[in-house]
Amino acid sequence: MKILIDLNHPAHIHIFKNIIKQCRQRGHDVLVTASSKDILLNLLDDYAVDYVKLSCYGKTMRQKICNMMKIDFQMFKIVKKYNPDVLIGVASFRAAHSAFLLRKKCFIFDDTENRKEIMLYYTFATKVFTPSCFDLELGKKQFRYNSYHELAYLHPDNFRPDPESLKKAGISENEKFFIVRFVSWEANHDIGQRGFSQEGKKEVIRKLEKHGKVIVSCEGEPPHDSKNIDLLIPADKMHDLLYYAAMYVGEGASMASEAAVLGTPSLYVNTITAGTLREQEDKYGLLCSCRNENKVFSKIDEFLEITDLKPKWREKRDLMLKDKKDLSAFIQTVLEADKIIV
């Protein structure tokens, strides 16, 4: 079978990296297409995944609209030449468009309800796969699975934390540390949303530094007084650090969910919400969503007063894992079956 996997965000390689490996081991022919988005191409190189490079959409809405047809045409030529049996991607409207025009199967995965791309891919996709907690009813093409995107690569069957990553990050054994994440607010779904103020960014770092080391993962310019920036840490080691961290605090939804499924207390500071985040908060208590920075400051104080905080979160994680599937195994089943096996 010939499979085309399209990537347009660093998180996408994490979701599909095990699928790429497994499919190739099973004798399938896999072609990966990727845009130059943030550190995506660096991650592909780190994981030794060969790929065909597509153009970048750009940062402004005008650039994205202007480049949309150009990249659609690039994808169409690649699909026509490669002639895959199926295309897959996360909210990949370019894959859906080419598949529709060339009469190919296209499976789209999505977990972001306020994503504007839904209207661009839904009509053209063969099937749209969403988590069971996804808030939107999309219609007859939608299939709900009982998992999260993050469990494609952070499920215990697929992930083993490496303590050596702590040494590479300059963290000594048993040292308490926190991970803080600030986003650039340039994504389509970030328009009109907000998280920390500039002063709030500095304040959260100052507050956490009193209790341990702070590692700041930042898109764009970091706060001037932040001491530790993740540029010094290999991107493929960040999940190890999230596993061992005492707490995650940040504006990034993906990293907030990653921390949650790893059993690390997760404080999410953003006006955007999603079904995945709400379920992790309301059903499993793994995440706390804060729509303003004042709430997060009080929550940090509350969490720091709990002496057995991390063991409690590990127990919550274990309960969540009893309910949820390994998403990589599910995707493998979808690709290799003519019918969907639940």
Image: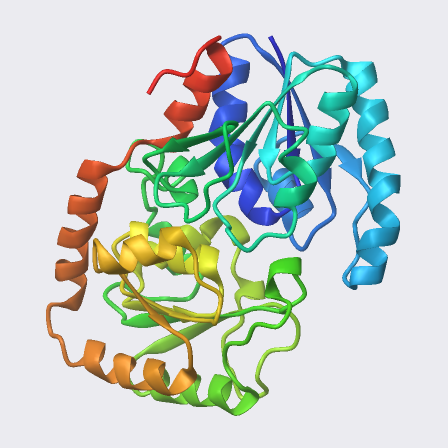
Residue 29, compared with residue 209, is above or below; it is above
- Give the residue at x 83% y 39%: 71
**Nearer the observer, 232 or 270:** 270
Residue 311, compared with residue 107, is above or below; it is below
- Give the residue at x 85% y 32%: 74
Residue 16 image position (x, y, % from top left): 52, 33
Indicate left or right for 208 with 101 as reference: left
The colouring scheme, among rainbow, by chain, secondary structure or one colour, is: rainbow
- Give the residue at x 54% y 47%: 11
**Nearer the observer, 306 or 289:** 289
Residue 87 image position (x, y, % from top left): 64, 23
Count of marks, rendered view:
0
Image quadrant holding the N terminus, namely: top right
**Nearer the observer, 25 or 189:** 189
Indicate left or right for 332 with 45 as reference: left
Residue 318 image position (x, y, % from top left): 17, 45
Residue 205 image position (x, y, % from top left): 43, 83
**Res 51 visible:** no
Indicate left or right for 52 with 258 as reference: right
**Res 139 visible:** yes
- Give the residue at x 62% y 72%: 192
Image quadrant holding the C terminus, namely: top left
